[in-house]
Image (tube, helix red, strand yellow):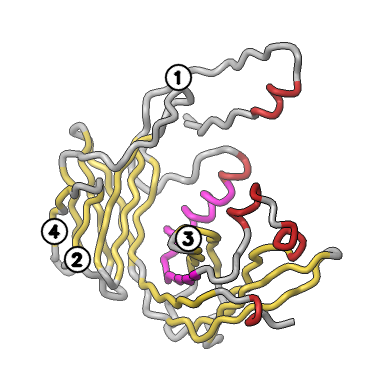
Amino acid sequence: MKYLYYIVALCLLCSCEEEIQLDYRPIEPIYVIEGHVSNDGSEVVITGTRDIEDPVLKTGIEVQSVVLSSDNGIKETLTYGEDGIYRSLSFVGIPDETYTLTVVIDGESYTSSSTMPGFTEIVSTSMRWEEMMGNDMLHLIVDVSDKADDINYYYYRILRNGKLFKWNVVRDLDSSNNTIQFDISCMSRDKAEKNDPDDYDSILFEGDDITVEVRAIDIKAYDYLFSAKLSGQNHSNPVYDFNGEVLGYFSAYTSTSKSFVFHYSDIED
């Protein structure tokens, strides 16, 4: 059974004189579990899907229990925080270890496991304009060291002033490489010059604080995030990562990041 997120096409409603009746059925909320174990600590947030008539965003909810364990016998029950997040700074991941997240909700147990890959690091970042279909596009080039043979899957995030700006997943099946390069398209020159307020969420401005984070992830996390990217285009749900009908995913990853201030003068022609 598919549980779809509903998107109302307001432009269609506004352009038609005849009133259109939308035929939809309310559904019971589905739990969403997002859990992470990294080299810096662990956190789990549990939310729920919303009905189309409920526009209020819900914070993380408290459930019966959230337990992290590893294949070397370490186990910890996480405590619910005031910010709606289950968090532990002491449960730190180690490469090559497999971790399991077990969440009990309304008497039902949901589990997912993930193996942490090895460490990587960002070697350099640069920016340049590249012509595409008659328009200049700003590209952020990120060079990452690929030291370990087990690192084949990556998840990168670009934060602008602390908020998510771009993200994607990358697969590298050529283990002979010592580095991997991410070529990230950020914005068009035309859009930047027009400076339309409607485009502010997709424009980099002089003086913006930029953080590039690269996570080495396992194939299960890659499959989920890749399907999540596609689901945003075809309005379907990502693949299930947990046993049972709950959404979300669990990932054990190593992370590296680099921050800089955006200046147009730093862009290579």
Residue at image position (37%, 29%) is: 29
Q: Say which mark, if any, is on residue 76.
A: 4
Tell which of 264 and 258 is nearer to you: 264
Please state the extent of the stretch shown in magenta in the rendering.
209-230
Q: Secondary structure at mark 3?
A: helix
Tag 4 or tag 3, which sits nearer the N-term? 4
**Callout 2, which amino acid?**
Leu
Tag 2 or tag 4, which sits nearer the N-term? 4
Tag 3 or tag 2, which sits nearer the N-term? 2
- Cα separation between marks 3 and 4: 26 Å
Residue 17 point in image, percent of width and height? 76, 14
Residue at image position (42%, 26%) is: 54
**Callout 3, which amino acid?**
Tyr
In the displayed structure image, the side of residue 89 where residue 21 appears, left or right: right
Q: Is residue 217 inside the magenta stretch?
A: yes
Tag 1 and tag 2, C-beta contact below 8 Å: no
In the displayed structure image, the side of residue 214 where residue 11 appears, left or right: right
The image quarter in which residue 93 lies: bottom left
Q: Secondary structure at mark 2?
A: loop
**Callout 1, which amino acid?**
Pro
Q: Is residue 12 inside the magenta stretch?
A: no
**Callout 4, which amino acid?**
Glu
**Label 3 sits on residue:** 222
Tag 1 and tag 4, C-beta contact below 8 Å: no
Tag 1 or tag 3, which sits nearer the N-term? 1
- Cα separation between marks 1 and 2: 39 Å
**Label 2 sits on residue:** 89
Residue at image position (84%, 63%) is: 133
Near mark 4 (Cα within 10 A), the count class, few <14, some 14-19 or many ≥20, is few
In the image, residue 238 sits, relative to residue 226, either above or below, namely above
